[in-house]
Amino acid sequence: MCHQTVSLVARYLEERGIPTMCMGSALDILTAGNPPRATFVDFPLGHTVGKPFDRDGQIDIVRRGLLGLETMTAPGIETLAVRWSDDEDWKREASDGASGGDVRQPRDTTPRYQYEEDRRLAEGG
């Protein structure tokens, strides 16, 4: 499911008094989706809650992300203070098409909506 749809569902639930927390590792997508409350994890795409088979690390990230349900007093996106590795080389490798990384074109940050009603809801109107 696309993150904008998840964000619309989150807003719908929040309007009915059900707290939500979106977590993601693509800040541009989280920002475009504009969820009521979100946690950004600066990890490779597909690894939002941690490294494969690192059960303890994954549980820690999920718990810390969900803590935002108690601590976030205003809508927004908070960045979780965690690191994928000791250096930032993974970011270069993840975007390097020659090494099999992400070869997609850079996203533009302009939100796109299928319906005008989606735009209105996403913009809080």
Image (spheres, grey):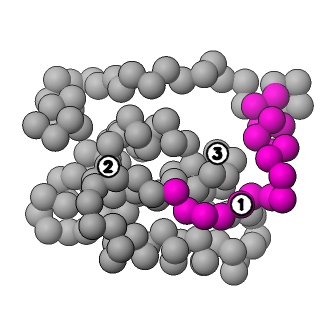
Q: Residues within 10 Å of mark 2 (few under 14, many from 20)?
A: many
| Residue 119 on image: x %, y % | 21, 29
Seen at 69% across and 74% down, the residue is 57
Tag 2 residue: 35
Location of the C terminus (image quadrant): top left
Q: Answer with the quarter of the image where residue 18 lies.
A: bottom left
Seen at 23% across and 37% down, the residue is 122
Circle 2 or circle 3, nearest the eye: 2
Q: Is residue 86 left or right of residue 2?
A: right
Seen at 55% across and 62% down, the residue is 80
**Residue 101 in view in this figure:** no
Tag 1 residue: 83
Q: Is residue 10 left or right of residue 89?
A: left
User: What type is the residue that disc 2 sits on?
Assistant: Pro
Q: Is residue 99 left or right of residue 19?
A: right
Q: Secondary structure at mark 2?
A: loop
Q: How far is disc 2 from disc 3 in space, using C-alphas?
A: 19 Å
Q: Residues within 10 Å of mark 1 (few under 14, many from 20)?
A: few
Q: Answer with the quarter of the image where residue 30 lies.
A: top left
Q: Is residue 106 magenta?
A: no
Q: How far is disc 1 from disc 3 in space, using C-alphas?
A: 14 Å
Question: Does the residue at mark 1 contact the one at mark 3 (Cβ under 8 Å)?
Answer: no
Tag 3 residue: 45
Q: Look at the picture and state if 10 lies above or below 95.
A: below
Question: Mark 1 vs mark 3: which is more N-terminal?
Answer: 3
Q: Secondary structure at mark 1?
A: loop
